[in-house]
Image (spheres, rainbow, N blue to C red):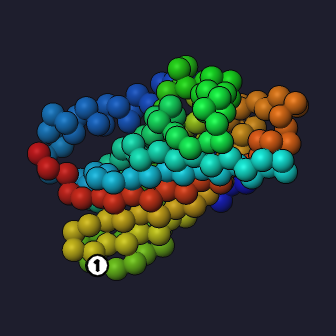
């Protein structure tokens, strides 16, 4: 898969990449950051497409979780791998979770970091921003810069992003027997609506 963000070279195969995000979510749940201007995902969808020579595979999930701190311009997202639905057959979904993504071992994909542009979140408008952070897929973290569209209107934030993920960069192996059915580069689309986080 091609990246629209720059990727770092070093990789780590640990599920601990999810722990910082989890700590943030827990601290927010207990109101430990009362002064931050926090927005959380109210509706969010992640869609992916594998367009290989012999087969097209599509799946999506609407269980995206996420937070944006508009003062610090930081963000954190998480999606359960096993929540993706679609595929071309139930067996294909089983293979996705068990053979390729190993979702029991690496249950979540996460992305956390900071928005590069210093925009005014209090002002309605349409902005193109770059989100720089650590993308953790299959237990392998990569630094990415993802270009996103941000629409601010009447206290609501809407985020749209399209990017690609290279399977090899996240140690996801595809057997030769199905090499023509699964693309090496996966297209990903994210749409999310954020509202101010309530206490």
- On screen, residue 134 versus residue 56, left or right, reads left
State the image quarter where residue 31 is shown.
top left
Residue 107 location, x and y as percent?
Answer: 49, 27
Q: Residue furthest front?
A: 89
Considering only vertical position in the picture, is 99 above or below 79? above
- Give the camera-side residue of 105 and 20: 105
Considering only vertical position in the picture, is 75 above or below 22? below
- Give the camera-side residue of 159 and 130: 159
- Give the camera-side residue of 138 and 37: 138
- On screen, residue 99 versus residue 124, left or right, reads right
Secondary element under disc 1, as helix, strand or loop, is: loop
Residue at left 14%, top 50%?
A: 198
Considering only vertical position in the picture, is 94 above or below 61? above
State the image quarter where residue 193 is shown.
bottom left
Please name the residue that numbered disc 1 is placed on. Answer: 124
- On screen, residue 177 versus residue 119, left or right, reads right
Task: Please tell me how crowded label 1 is: few (under 14), some (14-19), or many (20+) other residues with Cα within 10 Å.
Answer: some
Residue 8 location, x and y as percent?
Answer: 66, 44
State the image quarter where residue 125 is shown.
bottom left
Residue 56 location, x and y as percent?
Answer: 73, 50
Residue at left 41%, top 69%?
A: 150
Residue at left 53%, top 20%?
A: 104
Quarter of the image where the C terminus is located: top left
């Amino acid at each position: 898969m091609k990246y629209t963000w720059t990727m770092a070279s070093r990789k780590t195969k640990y599920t601990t990449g999810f722990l910082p995000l989890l700590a943030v979510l827990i601290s927010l749940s207990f109101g430990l950051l009362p002064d931050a201007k926090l927005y959380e995902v109210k509706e969010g969808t992640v869609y992916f497409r594998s367009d290989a020579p012999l087969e097209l595979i599509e799946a999506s999930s609407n269980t995206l979780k996420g937070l944006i701190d508009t003062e610090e311009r930081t963000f954190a997202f998480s999606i359960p791998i096993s929540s993706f639905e679609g595929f071309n057959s139930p067996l294909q979904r089983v293979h996705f979770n068990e053979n390729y993504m190993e979702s029991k071992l690496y249950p979540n994909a996460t992305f956390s970091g900071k928005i590069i542009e210093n925009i005014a979140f209090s002002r309605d408008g349409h902005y193109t921003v770059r989100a720089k952070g650590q993308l953790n897929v299959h237990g392998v973290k990569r630094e990415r810069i993802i270009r996103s569209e941000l629409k601010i209107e009447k206290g609501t934030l809407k985020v749209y992003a399209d990017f690609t993920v290279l399977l090899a960069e996240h140690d996801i192996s595809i057997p030769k027997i199905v090499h023509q059915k699964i693309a090496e580069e996966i297209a990903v689309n994210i749409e999310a609506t954020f509202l101010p986080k309530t206490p």
